[in-house]
Amino acid sequence: MNKRDLEKFEKLLLEKRKQLLKELGLLKEFSSDTQKDSSGDLSSHAYHMADLGTDAQEREKSFLLASKSGRLLYHIDEALRRIRDNVYGKCVVCEEEIAHARLEVVPHARMCVKCKEKEEQTKS
C-alpha cells in the first residue's frame, strides 16, 4: 500500500472516529438524566409503572448503542495504530494484502475476506 492510500484511509478513519465520539457524547448527555429528570416529574413517585418501564428500556437502548460504538471506536483506534506501525492493509492472520474494496467499506478491517469468513464459521 502506498503512502497516498495510507493517508486516504487515515483521513477516513479519523473522520469516522470524530463522528463516533460526537455520537457517544450525545448518548452520554441523554443517558446522564436520572429517571426523575427524564420524566419531568419533580416528585419521587411515578405516575404509572409503564412510564418506569419505558424509561428503563430507553436507558438500556442507550447503553447498548454506546457499547457497540465503543467497540467500533476501539477497532478504529487499532486501525490507526496499524497505519503508524506500517502494517495497515495486511491481514493479521495470513499477512496477505486486504483488498482495497474491503478497506473502502470497512476501513478498520484487520482480516482479509477469506480469513474473516473462516473466523465467522468457527463462531457458529
Image: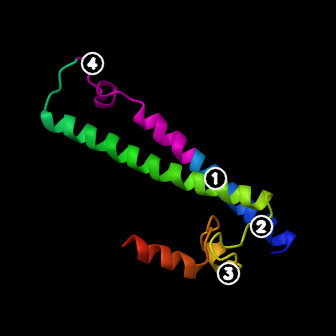
Instruction: Residue 82: give x, y in percent of width and height.
Output: 73, 60
User: Mark 1 — residue?
Assistant: 17
Q: Is residue 82 left or right of residue 26?
A: right
Q: CA distance from mark 4 to mark 2?
A: 51 Å
Q: Nearer the viewer, mark 4 or mark 3?
A: 3
Give the residue type at disc 1: Arg
The residue at the point 42 percent across, 77 percent down is: 121
Q: Quadrant of residue 93?
A: bottom right
Q: Nearer the viewer, mark 4 or mark 2?
A: 2
Q: In the figure, 36 relative to 21: above or below?
A: above
Assign a secondary structure to mark 3: loop
User: Mark 3 — residue?
Assistant: 99
In which quadrant of the rendered image does the C terminus lie?
bottom left
Residues rendered magenta in the picture: 22-43
Q: CA distance from mark 2 to mark 1?
A: 14 Å
Residue contact between numbered discs 1 and 4, judged by CB atoms under 8 Å: no
The residue at the point 29 percent across, 25 percent down is: 36
Q: Residues within 10 Å of mark 1 (few under 14, many from 20)?
A: many
Q: Nearer the viewer, mark 1 or mark 3?
A: 3
Assign a secondary structure to mark 2: helix
Q: CA distance from mark 4 to mark 3?
A: 57 Å
Residue contact between numbered discs 1 and 3, judged by CB atoms under 8 Å: no
